[in-house]
Image (cartoon, rainbow, N blue to C red):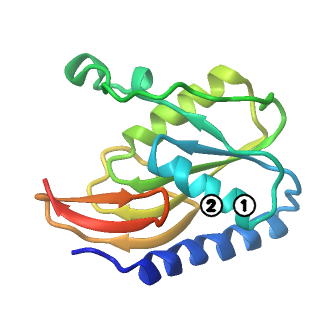
Amino acid sequence: MKYSKEQTQALLQKIENSLRDHLLKNQILDPIIIGVHTGGVWIAEWIQKRMGFDGKPASLNISFYRDDFSKVGVNPKVEPTDMPVSIDDKHIILVDDVLFTGRTTRAAINEIFDFGRPLSVTLVVLVERNGKELPISADIVGEKLELANDKNIKLEGPDPLILEIIDK
């Protein structure tokens, strides 16, 4: 099942609105936005532009931080981590496309803390789906989905961003 461009845009708008409310409520003025390769980076760029933050978001390649690294090896299309600013004592907005088992998020947080000690980390995901293996939940979610085990979620992009549910 493929979401339309408009349906995907509606989910993006939902996370933007929720993030604006979160930042206002918590008096966060200048967060650092960090996307997880690759879909999270696309969404982070979209958020950065829409919310008028300067520069471009940082990006994480969590390949070496995954706990299944020894089993699956390195993705041949690995992009480097790009952390252009200090994260010490900053509020971090960590962005990913899908929260599934929680292992990618755990790896991303481990890598973030290798760069410094932020004040807070807010997790923003386009989709949170069933199948968690770790006790990790997103703070801001576009949509929660219950999917059969033989299904995956894929974000196509970067322009336009289109969400798709595919067979494994």
Q: CA distance from mark 2 to mark 1?
A: 5 Å
| Residue type at tag 1 | Lys
Please give the count of numbered marks on the rendered protein.
2
Q: Secondary structure at mark 2?
A: helix
Determine the residue located farthest toward the front in the rendered image: 159
The residue under the point 65% across, 71% down is: 16
| Residue for badge 2 | 46
Asked if the residues shown at circle 2 and circle 1 are in contact, with their CB atoms under 8 angstroms apart, the answer is: yes
Left or right of residue 22, residue 77 in this image = left
Q: Which quarter of the picture shows residue 28?
A: bottom right
Q: Residue 32 at x, y = what percent? A: 75, 44
| Residue for badge 1 | 49
Q: Residues within 10 Å of mark 2 (few under 14, many from 20)?
A: some
* Closest to the observer, 117 or 84: 84
Q: Which quarter of the picture shows residue 82?
A: top right
Q: Residues within 10 Å of mark 1 (few under 14, many from 20)?
A: some
Left or right of residue 163, residue 125 in this image = right
The residue under the point 55% across, 71% down is: 12
Q: Is residue 121 above or below residue 80?
A: below
Q: Is residue 5 above or below residue 35?
A: below
Q: Residue 6 at x, y = what percent? A: 46, 83
Q: Secondary structure at mark 1?
A: helix
